[in-house]
Structure formats: C-alpha cells, structure tokens
Image (tube, rainbow, N blue to C red):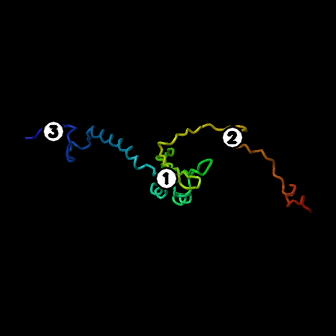
Amino acid sequence: MALPPLPVNPLVHRPSGDPRARGRTAPWRAALMASALVLAVPVAGCGVFAAPEQLRGNPADAEMLQQLTPGVSSRADVTAVLGSPSATSTFDQREWYYISATSHIRPGRVPAVDKQRVVVVRFDDRGIVEGIDQKGQDQMRDVAVVDRTTPVPGNDRSLLQALFGNIGRFGPTAAPETVPGANGGLGAPTR
C-alpha cells in the first residue's frame, strides 16, 4: 500500500535531500535576507569607510599644563613645555593661544572638526605666567563666513576669450641686434 503524497507547504523547512525542497525558497526567507542585506550595507560603511582622525594645531595636554605653575613659570618655560603659540594677543604679548582640533575627512565630503580646544596662557608685565584657561568648543563663537567677493576692475572674459585671448595681441619679436641696448648697453653692433 502506497502512502499518499505529503502536501506542499512553503513555510515548512525541508531537508536538502527532499525533492520537493529543491528550487524553492520561502518568500519570507528571501525578504528577510534582502532586508538584512539592505540594513547591513549602511552599518558596514560606518566603520569601514570612516576616515582616520587627524590632529591639527598645537595640542597642550593636561600633563604639559601641570608642568607650568602660575606665579613661577616664565615665557621661556612655557615655550620649552608647550612650544611656540598658535597665536598671540593683538596689541600686546600678554596672552598666548594654543589652538588644537581633531578633524576627519570622509571621501567626497567637506572636512569636519570633531573637537576643538584653545588654551590661553596669560602673562603679567614681568613675563611670568599669571593664569591658564582652557576653552572648549561649547565656549567658542560660530563665525559666519561671508560668501561675497570683491569686484575687480577689468572686463569679464568668456571661456573662449580666456583660451584664445592672447592670439594676435603681440607683434613679431624683433631681432636682438635691432633692439637698443641689447648688446650689453653698447648700442648698435659694429660690422
């Protein structure tokens, strides 16, 4: 007596040797695999294509700042420990600024600043450290860059004028013996 054939249910997992399982995949399984692939691509891109961080400027670490003592350290001591400042105060040499930033550049994007820090070293009239302040990114002002340009006198040239503008502008060059003073300032050559 032969057994009746089993009903085909696509949601039931069949062993790979079962002839009814060949060539069939459950629709929910294909949708699950496709959605996992779509979700995995952006997540994988975050770590694989991330640009390395670059340190810019003159970082004044906390360990370096501990070597400086207000009221004792001089300008020479600050230069020996921190190096030359990134900037100084505009009208006098009483404040030195050590500016540092950590940035990264991703392919096809503009450079982005992650962390920025400014260390301000103030001196008294004798050149002795009066105080040290640290300013983080939250204490800095955003400066809007103006996108205007200053007009330059002259004519606005098209692309063709820029490429072919010098054609016919200058005459033929003169031979050296006809140019006055060409022979070492002696005038016309003697023959």
Of the numbered discs 1 and 2, the one sitting upstream in the chain is 1
Q: Nearer the viewer, mark 1 or mark 2?
A: 1
Instruction: Determine the residue located farthest toward the left in the rendered image.
Output: 1
Label 3: how many Cα within 10 Å (few below 14, some 14–19, many 20+): few
Provide the residue designation for mark 3: 6
Nearer to us: label 2 or label 3: 2
Instruction: State the residue at coordinates (81%, 50%).
Output: 172
CA gap, disc 3 to disc 1?
68 Å
Q: Residue at x 27, y 38 (%)?
A: 28
Q: Is residue 55 above or below residue 12?
A: below
Q: Which amino acid, mark 2? A: Leu
Q: Amino acid at mark 3?
A: Leu
- Who comes first in sequence, dot 3 or dot 1? 3
**Closest to the observer, 75 or 45:** 75
Q: Is residue 181 above or below residue 139?
A: below
Amino acid type, residue under disc 1 in the picture: Leu
Q: Which residue is disc 1 drawn over?
A: 55
Label 3: element kind: loop
Position of residue 152 measured from the top left corner of the image (x, y, whole percent): 70, 39
| Vertical comparison of 133 with 150: above or below | below
- According to the picture, the residue beneath numbered tag 2 turns out to be 160
Residue depth check, mark 3 versus mark 1: number of the one nearer the observer: 1
Q: How many other residues sit within 10 Å of disc 1, few (<14), some (14-19) or many (≥20)?
A: some
Name the foreground residue: 20 vs 140. 140
Percent of width and height locating residue 62 = 45, 54
**Screen quadrant of the N terminus:** top left
Taking the image as shown, residue 21 lies to the left or right of residue 39, namely left
Q: Toward which corner of the image does residue 127 lie, by quadrant?
A: bottom right
Q: Secondary structure at mark 2?
A: helix
Distance (Cα) linking label 2 and label 3? 79 Å
